[in-house]
Amino acid sequence: MMIVIAIVGILAAVAYPSYTEYLKRAHRSEIAGLLTDTAQQLERFYSRNGQYSDVTGPPAVGLEITQGNRVYTVAAERGIQSFTLTAMPIATGVMSGDKCGGFLMDNVGKRDNLNLAGGATSTQCWGH
């Protein structure tokens, strides 16, 4: 019986880190998609109105935003000719301390990360 418990413990010790990394990759992919969709909404708004900053813009990106998914908080800074979208991990969430840190996207398509760690690159974090 002890041998079976030991084997199950070893398998769990090996499988759990892989599973948590898989979940983190899924959360990173989700937030990258959310930021890309929001940027596209802002670009459509800009093409119709000639500015990003109008308060009546896309509802997903108001001047102050606390939307996101369950593990990131998304903020939007909108100017007349530019915008910056930022997604930061929630401090108590599963992504706090993640190697990719926060995600940043602007109106020229620049994608970057804030607080990269562990040898991670923006290219890896954004999935490209």
Image (spheres, helix red, strand yellow):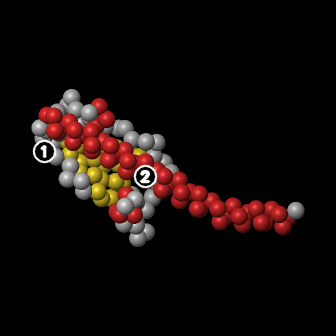
Residue 118 placement, left or right of 16: left
The reply to whether callout 2 and callout 1 are in contact (CB within 8 Å) is no
Tell me the residue at 23%/51% (across/down).
106
Rendered image: mark on residue 29: 2
| Residue 111: image location, x then y, percent | 29, 57
Earlier sequence position, callout 2 versus callout 1: 2
Rendered image: mark on residue 81: 1
Residue 40 placement, left or right of 94: left
Report the amino acid beneath label 2: Ser
Determine the secondary structure under disc 2: helix
Tell me the residue at 36%/66% (across/down).
121
Q: Nearer the viewer, residue 48 or 63?
A: 48
| Residue 22: image location, x then y, percent | 54, 57
Q: Quadrant of the N terminus?
A: bottom right
Dot 1, crowdedness within 10 Å: few (<14), some or many (≥20)?
A: few
Quarter-wise, where is residue 20 in the image? bottom right
Rendered image: mark on residue 49: none
Tell me the residue at 15%/42% (across/down).
79
Tell me the residue at 59%/57% (across/down).
19
Quarter-wise, where is residue 126 in the image? bottom left
Residue lying at the far right of the rendered structure: 1
Rendered position, 106 above or below 58: below
Residue 23 placement, left or right of 30: right
Dot 2, crowdedness within 10 Å: few (<14), some or many (≥20)?
A: some
Q: Nearer the viewer, residue 5 or 111?
A: 111
| Residue 41: image location, x then y, percent | 27, 39
